[in-house]
């Protein structure tokens, strides 16, 4: 049987493969101010429910899966307007500059397509801070990247091999920064013990 | 806040909402927010309510039990982390391996270098002191370490270096009414030994907690060999911290005008065990906690940290070494 991959792992992998390894292979998770805020927001979003927003039918906090891709995960919100279904992923901050959220939306779209048999053309990333939606087009390129990322995650979770910790600017916002010490190797190379 | 030390005998530890509450005969002595608690150390006896056990385990807050004199008795251990990779690296290096040799060399080098710099500092500060002999003995041992091919021989240098250091320790007490002849324990029979033993027991609680967080099995060590019920790895990593945290703090506490005096100690008949009075113990614990929270610049990471944080940083660096991410283990060596 194909190893089922949590949809959120794609997002983490695209952010940083090492973080993905720590979370899903080593079972580490540390809350920081960003994750606590995110979890609190999500508790509201994730309350399962059905309803309408003007013309749009909405369902919140439902599990999605795809047998074809071996994916499983929860969608914050799935909406349908004029018979067209699309996922909406809620994010705590402002729109972030990395494409990892798009991958997550795309993976949700792939699940929805398989579950309903109808094509999913787009999705949204909703920023809780700016209260705006950004449309994510499920373009062939995005689908390709999502599937490639999915395969990379599956490889990671199957082998358990640890990808190197690489220091980058975004490391500063990572809740696992103090565990991962991504600068250790370069700092060690320069260090002279007294 | 950090670690809470419970020194009043026969108290009750309960939980009220988000606070840990300490009661004695129904009377509330103190309560602290659980959020601020990094550890609990009970010296003596205490009743711990089921809900406190529950919340300490859930929040990964370690609880250690020491005797009134600081002898370690046991601890309430949260589940080990799921990070099997750290433990795999730790076990793969076990025994006489090239990796464990590098680690042990690091532990011993860290300890001896920190002994050396403590003595050098004291030598600079006082003309009436002559510890140069011990300093050069330590220099000799440190110089030999890189070429020392076995762990057994490294243990030999560690012993020789410690002997040289404790051989002049009494001189460091000049100007105080205290005397130190040799290191003794189980039970310590003079005030200085009793403070060192108590300090090392507290340090061990803290280092072991840090190693647990990193994901180590604290019972598999390299310098200290496996022995039932002994947290060998905690004792290994502790070595470099002994002079930095405990010895330095004890010396300053005995030298300070308002520090500890002979009147702060009491001796038991027959066995000669020496321990602090309750008031002395309070001041000692406060000094230890202050020392732990004092800041310095971590020489490898190049950023400010407290000793409390350094326990974990050293654990993480050791994990990185054992997992092959860095080439050697850098002990915390300070000037």
Image (cartoon, coloured by chain):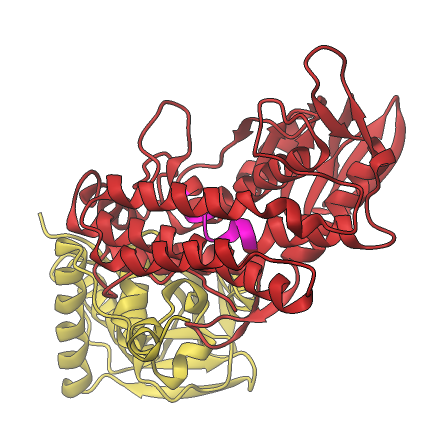
Q: Which residue is found at the position 51% from the left and 76% from the top?
A: B303
Residue B119 % position (x, y): 56, 59
Q: Residue extending furthest top?
A: B270
Q: Does the magenta stretch include residue B195?
A: no
Q: In this view, does B268 lie to the left or right of A88?
A: right
Q: Is residue B272 above or below residue B297?
A: above
Q: Which residue is found at the position 84% from the left and 41% from the top?
A: B261
**Front-most of residues B229 and A193:** A193
* Residue B2 seen in this snapshot: no
Q: Is residue B299 above or below residue B157?
A: below
Residue B201 % position (x, y): 58, 36
Q: Is residue B199 above or below residue B51?
A: below
**Front-most of residues B59 and B41:** B41
Residue B242 % position (x, y): 53, 48
Q: Which residue is found at the position 59% from the left and 35% from the top?
A: B63
Range of residues picked out in magenta: B236-243
Q: Chain B is drawn in which colour?
A: red
* Residue B80 seen in this snapshot: yes
Residue A123 % position (x, y): 33, 80
Q: Residue extending furthest right?
A: B27
**Front-most of residues B128 and A111:** B128
Q: Does the magenta stretch include residue B239?
A: yes
Q: In this view, does A192 lie to the left or right of A4?
A: right
Query: Which quadrant of the figure has residue B182?
Result: top right
Q: Main secondary structure of the magenta part?
A: helix
Which quarter shows the C terminus of chain A? bottom left
Query: Which quadrant of the figure has residue B30?
Result: top right
Q: Chain A is drawn in which colour?
A: yellow
Q: In this view, does A85 lie above or below B18?
A: below
Q: Residue extending furthest left?
A: A1
Q: Which residue is found at the position 32% from the left and 41% from the top?
A: B155
Q: Is residue B311 left or right of residue A124?
A: right
């Amino acid at each position: 049987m194909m190893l089922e991959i949590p949809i959120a792992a794609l997002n983490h992998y695209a952010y940083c493969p090492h973080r993905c390894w720590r979370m899903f292979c080593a079972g580490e998770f540390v809350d920081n101010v960003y994750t606590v805020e995110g979890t609190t927001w999500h508790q509201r979003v994730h309350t399962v429910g059905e309803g309408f927003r003007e013309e749009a039918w909405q369902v919140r906090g439902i599990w999605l899966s795809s047998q074809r891709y071996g994916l499983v995960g929860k969608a914050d919100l799935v909406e349908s307007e004029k018979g067209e279904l699309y996922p909406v992923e809620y994010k705590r901050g402002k729109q972030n500059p990395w494409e990892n959220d798009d991958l997550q939306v795309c993976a949700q779209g792939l699940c929805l397509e398989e579950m309903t048999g109808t094509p999913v053309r787009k999705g949204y990333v909703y920023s809780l801070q700016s209260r705006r939606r950004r449309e994510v087009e499920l373009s062939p390129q995005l689908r390709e990247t999502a599937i490639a990322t999915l395969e990379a995650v599956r490889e990671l979770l199957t082998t358990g091999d640890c990808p190197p910790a690489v220091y980058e600017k975004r490391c500063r916002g990572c809740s696992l920064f103090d565990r991962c010490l991504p600068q250790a190797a370069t700092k060690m190379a320069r260090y002279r013990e007294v | 806040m950090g670690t809470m030390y419970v020194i009043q005998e026969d108290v009750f530890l309960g939980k009220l909402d988000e606070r840990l509450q300490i009661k004695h005969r129904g009377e509330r002595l103190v309560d602290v927010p659980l959020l601020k608690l990094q550890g609990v150390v009970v010296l003596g006896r205490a009743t711990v309510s089921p809900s406190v056990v529950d919340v300490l385990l859930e929040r990964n807050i370690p609880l250690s039990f020491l005797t009134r004199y600081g002898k370690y008795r046991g601890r309430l251990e949260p589940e080990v982390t799921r990070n099997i990779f750290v433990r795999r690296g730790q076990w793969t290096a076990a025994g006489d391996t090239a990796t464990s040799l590098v680690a042990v060399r690091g532990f011993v080098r860290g300890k001896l270098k920190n002994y050396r710099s403590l003595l050098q500092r004291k030598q600079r500060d006082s003309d009436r002191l002559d510890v140069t002999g011990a300093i050069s003995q330590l220099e000799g041992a440190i110089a030999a370490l890189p070429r020392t091919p076995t762990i057994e021989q490294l243990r030999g240098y560690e012993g020789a270096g410690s002997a040289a250091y404790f051989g002049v320790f009494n001189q460091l007490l000049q100007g105080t009414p205290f005397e130190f002849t040799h290191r003794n324990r189980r039970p310590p029979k003079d005030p200085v030994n009793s403070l060192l033993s108590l300090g090392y027991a507290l340090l061990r609680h803290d280092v072991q907690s840090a190693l647990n967080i990193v994901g180590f099995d604290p019972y598999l060590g390299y310098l200290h060999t496996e022995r039932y019920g002994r947290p060998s790895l905690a004792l290994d990593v502790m070595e470099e911290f002994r002079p930095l945290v405990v010895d330095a703090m004890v010396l300053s506490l005995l030298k300070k005008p308002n520090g500890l005096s002979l009147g702060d100690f009491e001796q038991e008949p027959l066995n000669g065990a020496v321990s602090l009075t309750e008031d002395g113990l309070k001041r000692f614990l406060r000094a230890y906690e202050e020392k732990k929270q004092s800041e310095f610049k971590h020489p490898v990471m190049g950023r400010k940290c407290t000793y409390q944080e350094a326990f974990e940083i050293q654990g993480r660096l050791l994990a990185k070494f054992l997992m092959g991410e860095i080439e050697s283990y850098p002990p915390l060596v300070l000037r």
